[in-house]
Image (cartoon, grey):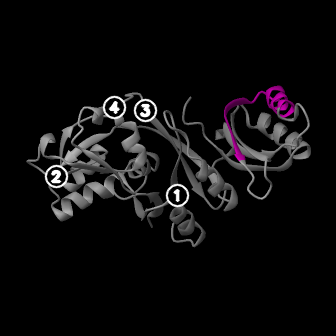
Amino acid sequence: MKKRIAIQGIKGSNHHQVALDYFDEPIELVECMSFDAIVDHLLNNTADKGVMAIENSIAGSILPNYALVYHNNLHIIGEHYLNIHHNLMVLNGQKLSDITEVHSHPMALLQCKEFFRGQPHIKLVEDEDTAETARRIHDNGLKGVAAIAPRMAAELYGLEIIAPEIQTIKNNATRFIIVKTQNKELPREEINKASVRFITDHKRGSLATVLNVMSDCHLNLTKIQSLPIIQTPWKYAFFVDVTFEEYGQFEKAKALLSIMLEDFKVLGEYKNARL
């Protein structure tokens, strides 16, 4: 039986590409138009695992997704990095001079802003998904409208790429996490990265003490992100990613930090995708 994988977007999206790259088995795609919908499918058991973008090398962290993972008790079981390539695509036979509107996800539009500075006749329109826009152009025969989307979308929906690689910064990558409702996935000897969440008190040096414990246990901090706690103004939770050579190092840190910290929680233990 094929694993049901929930993604944000449709076939031809970057999330679809990550699902194909990450899972070395046939999968059944569950298309979702929002990250909340991914969570709903996981909680309702209509999907087995989900693929969720968590940060971009240019735009930074996707903050709401940290909260989604925590508040819905999801577990991060893996990660994948994808180089992002933005391509301008149209119905066959259309030229750049014919285009009056470009539709795409807000992030894609933002990352291609420099290209459109030289095209003042083109209006940029925010849409829900890169690939969904490409499909709509094909299905409705939309002339004068272009999409910014991955190359796979052009192949799937029969569109022509009239301007490849239009992203302003060519070295552009997104980190995706693989999530599910249970954390039993890898044997401990294969685990060398973890994501945790915790709250510190307002005492001076509280965060520094936590970081010192991590350092003493030979953990390498690869990411730290703070998010406000909505119910308690001016108090923050920290989301932290760490890597380590041996699982025992993280196990020791877990034991210490769970005693020291308020609301310490492991969000996932998995394999580092960037070795």
| SS label for mark 4 | helix
Numbered label attached to residue 172: 3
In the image, which is nearer the foreground, mark 1 or mark 4?
4
Numbered label attached to residue 114: 4
**Residue at image mark 1:** 50
218 in the magenta segment = yes
Gap between marks 2 and 3, in whole Å? 28 Å
Which comes before the other along the chain, label 2 or label 1? 1
Above or below residue 8? Residue 53 is above
Gap between marks 2 and 4, in whole Å? 20 Å
The amino acid at mark 2 is: Gly
Which comes before the other along the chain, label 3 or label 1? 1
Number of residues whose C-alpha sits closer than 10 Å to that of mark 3, classed few (under 14), some (14–19) or many (20 or more): some
Gap between marks 4 and 3, in whole Å? 14 Å
Gap between marks 2 and 1, in whole Å? 35 Å
**Residue at image mark 2:** 144
Task: Indicate the position of residue 149 as horizontal and vertical percent values.
Answer: 31, 46
Above or below residue 190? Residue 154 is below
Q: Is residue 56 left or right of residue 185?
A: left
Number of residues whose C-alpha sits closer than 10 Å to that of mark 1, classed few (under 14), some (14–19) or many (20 or more): many
Which comes before the other along the chain, label 4 or label 3? 4
Q: Which residues are magenta?
A: 208-227
Task: Indicate the position of residue 230 as horizontal and vertical percent values.
Answer: 73, 56
Q: Is residue 230 left or right of residue 217?
A: left
The amino acid at mark 3 is: Asn
The amino acid at mark 4 is: Glu
Number of residues whose C-alpha sits closer than 10 Å to that of mark 2, classed few (under 14), some (14–19) or many (20 or more): some
Residue drawn at x 77%, y 37% is: 250
Examine the image and state in which quarter residue 275 appears. Answer: top right
